[in-house]
Image (cartoon, rainbow, N blue to C red):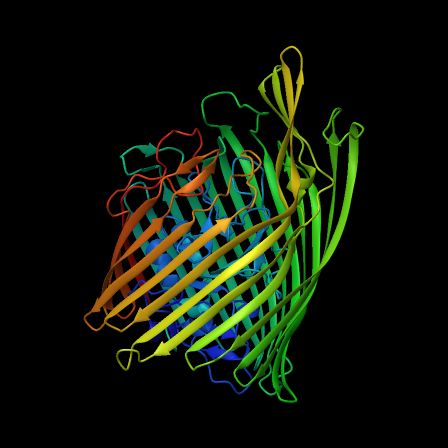
Amino acid sequence: MAAVDQARAQDQETELPGITVEGGAQKKPTVSPAPVAPPPQAQPQPTASAEPTPAADVPYETPAAISVVGEGEIDTFGQTRLDSVLRTVPGTFTRESASNPGIAVNIRGFEGQGRVNMMIDGVRQNFRFTGHEAGGFAYVDPLLIGGIEIQRGAVTTTGGAGALAGTANFRTIDVQDVLKPGATEGALTSLSWGSNGLGWAEMGSAAMRSGAVSVVGALSHHDESDYDNGDGETVPYTGEDLWSGLFKVHFDIAPGERLSLQAMRYQNDFVANSYDQTVTSDIYKASYRLRPTDNPLVDFIANVSLSNVEMEYGSYYTGTAPSIENGEGRTIEDRGVGVDASNTSRFKLGIFNVSSNYGFEYYSDDVEASNGGVNPNGKSDLASGFTQTTFSYGIWDLIAGLRYQSFNLEGSTTLNANNPFGLTAGKYDIDENESSWDPKATLAAQVTPWLQPYVTYSQSMRAPTVNETLMVAEHPYFPPYYVLEFVPNPFLVPEEQRGWEFGFNVKQDGVFSPKDRFRLKADYYRQKVKNYITSCIVETFTPPFSQRDYAYFCNNFGTTELQGVEIEGEYDAGYMFAQASYTYTHSEIPQQVNGLGAESYMPDHVFSITGGLRFLDERLVVGMRGTFVSETELGSGNYESAYGLADAFASYNVYDGLDMSLTVTNLFDKAYTPALGTVPTGDPGVETGRGRTFILTTRAQF
């Protein structure tokens, strides 16, 4: 959601192509989120002479389905779980696991296996494992996040390769988030305590600028225990012990030229999937940017990154023998390498102002599993070239994009006798290659100074993953009478999406008073998906009592449809503010079979509204947030009940650099189970939503 506080929105230093908004760290006395710069593909394309655009207004000037979540909103509502924030973004939801602290973003009903490209500072997070869970997680500490950028639909520039439904980028804090305006050195600290098992959370960061060098470092810790639901019942195995930290350094080589290096570590201990688990995530990235002020043809960005995520299984926790092979000592590791480079050229072509972004991206995933159960070893590569060009004339913008992408998957697997493909039993070496051309076109018109309608056609492709193609294992429910065998499928083909989007942006200042502001963004989309990958089961029966079933990932050949409406808006009059978002989703996408992922039935309706008042020269802020979720289909005619939640918040700016806040989540202690929720280890049979929780936070900047 975009920011509601225009003044504080401009305090955030943000770099966009052709746009620079500079200042110090964002002040923290309101829930109003600090704006976050969307990636290049989501940005309006100004000419070199364009006036600077406040970063908070970027979503409302961009003819695409994008949303941003700022640091203020994350600090207020994201300390229990980031899911609480993401689920209020239009067209966006999450698979919320009560035990696993990872983030699994769902866009327009698509989740898992890379359908949504989740990134941390632009670095892809492709860690996946197969089970009764989401088909992929990103692990990031909420206390180190400076903002979240969501793009829904096909993306034809950096970050969009291989993503069927969109992207989600978690931006971590940087120098400008820590330093006060004009300062050359400083620190930012946060200390919070939460009831209902949340416990203490500490974050400390420091930064400095000296000549052409600027650095920032941060360390965070959070030790959480099991929480109670709204009925006062303990939801077991919902704690965590999280340590994380980051370091970044920037070298300003010359005006408009910068080299940046960063390193980040995340380590968390928790209990999920019936085992004590430790997840360690290491991210390394080097970035180079060249943007000379006297050459509009050059705005060059290059990135090289390494992401290594490892999950280690410890002791078995449910008190009974494992129903599948013992996973103690299991490790699953994903080593990802990424390279991308792009340039934006701005020039005149006859009567048109032209802004052309073009480049390539490549990433490789090497997956290794020891005692991995159904999780195989394998390697996949995806290479892509892209171009997106905006032709502007008068009120009109025509944005034409094209992506070429090619993927390769390699690995070995085993097929047993009587497999569902009729192949000879034995070991098979897999080497799969596929490619696609995916166009995207948008026509937008600034019909009035405050209204911009647009229409978009797009296509996208997602290749099968190592997990889907190569998995192999047995699940002996009642051996020898009933055995479920997981088998690989070397015949999978990519998923394809094509569809239309119709939307509009409204941006108007001075509606009822000279200093108020109103923003509105809405769209309707309709998409068709071919060859969607889910799981299939083939049943076999050998008299008199023996049954062996085969489960594998398969394409649902043919076309399925989905459509929806996404709306978000805000009004700010200084002394009061309001934000709202609404999502309607109607999807016919086939569902996963539990065990090879998790069912991803979306609620038809999700509505969120936040409002508040500011007092004492806006130093004191009080407000509430309401979230309403309709009933959710669970398959076989079963439904999860609808629910509504209320949260309250207050903050006070004691003096410049010191803020204190109180947040109460689930104010009325509602007993509920989150839509798209995964039950914790042991399935205790209780409502899994967190009960009423008080969070006290002190934030100091000096």
Q: Quadrant of residue 542?
A: top right
Q: Position of residue 303 (x, y in %)?
A: 62, 65
Left or right side of 653 for 5: right
Residue sitting at 55 percent across and 61 percent down? 262
Work out whether 32 lies above or below 108. below
Q: Position of residue 250 (x, y in %)?
A: 54, 70
Left or right side of 382 for 145: left
**Residue farthest along the right direction in this orientation:** 424
Residue 208 shows up from this direction: no
Work out whether 537 lies above or below 403. above
Q: How many marks?
A: 0
Residue sitting at 32 percent across and 58 percent down? 609
**Residue farthest along the left direction in this orientation:** 616
Q: Position of residue 563 (x, y in %)?
A: 51, 55
Left or right side of 84 for 495: right
Residue sitting at 34 percent across and 79 percent down? 509
Residue sitting at 78 percent across and 32 percent down? 427
Q: Nearer the viewer, residue 397 or 167?
A: 397
Tell me the quadrant of the picture where the C terminus can be found.
Answer: bottom left
Q: Nearer the viewer, residue 501 or 339?
A: 501
Work out whether 557 lies above or below 564. above
Tell me the quadrant of the picture where the N terminus can be found.
Answer: bottom left
Work out whether 201 lies above or below 683. below
Q: Position of residue 40 (x, y in %)?
A: 56, 70
Q: Quadrant of residue 573?
A: bottom left
Left or right side of 585 for 475: right
Q: Nearer the viewer, residue 324 or 507?
A: 507
